[in-house]
Image (tube, coloured by chain):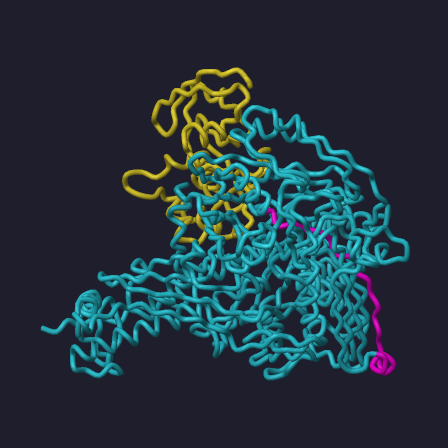
Amino acid sequence: MDQIVEKPDTLIGAAFPKPDAPDKVVGKTTYINDMVLPRMLVAKIKRTDRVHAKILSVDISEAEKVPGIVAIATAENSPKGLIGVLKDNPPLKGDKVRCIRDEIAGVAGETEEAVNRALELIKVEYEDLPTVFDPEEALKEGAPLIHEDKPGNIGLTFDFEHGDVKKAEAESDVVLEEKYELHYVTHTCMGPGCVIADFDTHGKLTIYTQTQYPYNYKMDLAPALDIPAGDIRVIQPPTGGAFGSKLDVYPFEPIAVYLAKIARRPVKLFFSREEEFIASPTRQPARVYIKQGAKKDGTITFRDVQVYLNNGGYTSWGATIPAVMMRTMTGHFRIPNVEFHSVAPYTNNPFAGSFRGYGNVQATYVTATLMDKMAEELGMDPIEFRLKNAQEPGERTPQNSLLKNAALADCIKISAEKTDFLKKHAEYTEARKTPGRIRQGIGIATSVHNAGGAKIHKSDGCGTILTMDDYGRATVITGASEIGQGIDAVITQLVSEELGIPPSDVLIANDDSAIGPWDVGVHASRTTFIAGNSARNAAVKAKQQILAAAARQSNVSADKLELRGGHVVQKDNGVSVTKLDRLIRAMHFAGEDAELVMVSEYYEPPSELEDKNHVGDISAAYAHGAYITELEVDTLTGGVKLHKITAVQDVGKVINKLGIEGQMEGGIAQGIGYGLSEELIIEEGIVKNPNFRDYKVVTAPEMPEIECHFIEDDEETGPFGAKGISELPCIIPGASIANAVYNAIGVRFDNPPITPEKIVRALHGGKAEAAE
Amino acid sequence: MSAKIDIEFTVNGAVKQVTVPATASALDMLRDQLDLKGAKEACGEGECGACTVIVDGVSVCSCLSYAVDFDGRKIETIEGVQSDEGLDPIQQAFVDYGAVQCGYCTPGMVMQVKHTLDKNPNPTKEEIQRGLEGNVCRCTGYSKIIDAVTEVASS
């Protein structure tokens, strides 16, 4: 009797729980913060208390005497290599300090008490230097110089020009000129910063780290350590969130390595929550001057953008955000003439890194509120004005992003229809004319983001090694990092789908750089797209090898066979030809014809690097989103209560329903924080609110209802049609909220977050902090 | 070095005798002396809830409690929630509803939900949200957590 194997339901689009979730809900997962190695020392950092000062002396003599202290690293006894995007940051400072987070010494000891005692006993003598905190002030003649080799305090600059902005301005019927001040926010990963360094007796380093880019991490870390990158093995234990904060090497990591080298013992260096607020990278703040023009009929004529990015003391990824910001400024809506100029001057503030959404959170806050302002100026409604300027599928932006299947107009239309936007918008605008304490508001914002990787390095690829054991189980060794976002679930689904085995028979291995193949890292909404394609392609290769073997064994040609339910079956009738595990064993134990199912794949997306003029189709796909916020404002207290966010987004194809909704909702929560409550307050270079009491992340009671509508347009280059999705949810809500607040009370806030204090001041007087 | 004090209490049904420094937090004692590392230190000042355990039926931030205050008490930690039958319904719902991403807040969340539902088995959505207000999650936006709790409460 033939065994018929029914085709199981597809896993693509299913609500598939994360494989790491069960261990996490029972408290079994060992995060890096939980790890203890034999003879491991604990370590902390002695930081400066100045924002700009010459270091005259560092005296560790008393600290060394504390019982239990094993190693102290200072600039004097440590390697001199530099870290950071511009290699301008010595992990331990010897000559001067440039911002409040600066590292003077690392101390490792047997107990935390001993280490804390020693930190107090390190004596540092300084000579204070003149300070500068404002990016435009820092560019002025005679401003204090932050780095002696950076004249004029000029860090990274970005410039792009397309068309003729001057001519377009002259021909415009309406021109708006605005200034935005975009603030500091920070990641507040729940797992505080932590690293463990351990040398073997050959002098090779194993580093346990929270990094989200394990392969280039080695390359960036090695120069600071005076050891070859090849001598570094990166282990990634489970981590308590990243969101972009772990995409560079930061000083605490090399400092832990210096201590491990001195002590010849494993060293674990970890942050307190206060340190996490003060000494981890922030989102890049930005001051944006923007001019936009339009014709009477609503056609946008030009944008002219000048951006000042407060670089802080050193250069990490923050100063590079124009690379992303620019794509939205120049390419979100049809902008025929555009200039973009940015400069990141060094100051004595802390410095910024990458943070989910990159510069697009800032660019979208600016452009999406400006679109609303201009619609009003033109006497058009916010939907009509946007649709007038929305690109059609197939258009290219001035920077050459090819919007193959641009869904911008669809996103706008669907979101407006679902929320009855125009009716409510008009009604709430009208309601402002009559008295009333509680005001309703509705606002729309849109954006575009790379959704098929982002080629900012020479390769945007990801490797996969897929092996199958004698029991029909697959091990997928992927370059992609799991930082909580759920790539392990996605890859499990893709591989399970291709190989016709249950997801419980797929094991993902991706925590060891000595085993895993190269990958750029988790960033740029790329992982489902890039690593997903890589894993799927690997599974297809394995499948081909298996079916070829089955064909030889069964005399049924391979193209008539497929994998289903742990069997090789005949495609047309589902009749099992052989069980998969039995076939694999037969392949393995076939004497001199023996073969293992063991394949590798390196997927490189079809995209190109930007040229020196910032022109290039950097992503294999782009995605749009339109988010509508409905809220109410209490005009007496300034309180904003969110009712609902309707998110319409082009996602290509849903792979994991739970995962995609989780990314949407989590990103939206961060976006709400950006718009309404989160601000890292930095005064004269000092972080004033380094705790969860005063830095207000969104908590459960503040979450509105969220309705997601996914446009599934089956991206031809994506795995089963999927695009990358995870940054737009964080990018768009802030601007959508700002537009809804305006609809409610008629006040613009070009300086988020829109706190109750700002609203009350704007409505009832007091220090004017609202729109300029 | 602070004075050491002998304490005795119940953790997840088992009696424990521990000698703790007078100044040690309950969280450090649980993690470092009893090797119960499910509860996390994410802020150390009672603002995030990642260290939540249940003491005599009440959820507390163990980072703010002194270890010595556990003397004579009945403590429940995340390690004791799973039974011989498998995951607790709260834990199962967290898995099934996608309420876990990085998972660092999850043990504290589960303990807080357990406390909330013990006190009020049929909470409204608003009561669920209020019950979680002291627990910070940076990944999920809480929606899936609220869905999971709603499911447990309704079944």
Decide if residue A653 is in sight here: yes
Frontmost residue, A183 versus A464? A464
Residue A110: x and y, percent? 51, 29
Residue at the spot 82% in from the left edge and 38% down from the top edge:
A127
Task: Please give the count of numbered marks on the rendered protein.
Answer: 0
The yellow one among the chains is: B
Horizontal and vertical percent for residue A451? 55, 70
Where residue A670 appears, as percent x and y from the top left, is: 61, 54
Q: Is residue B51 left or right of residue A341?
A: left
Magenta-span inclusion, residue A175: yes
One can see residue A387 in this view:
no
Chain A colour is cyan
Write down the region rendered in magenta: A166-188
In the picture, measured across the screen, residue B110 lies left or right of residue A7, that is right
- Residue A630, x across and y down, in percent: 64, 59
Q: Is residue A357 above or below residue B51?
A: below
Question: Is B6 placed left or right of A254 in the picture?
Answer: left
Write the residue at 74% across / 52% down: A312
Magenta highlight on residue A80:
no
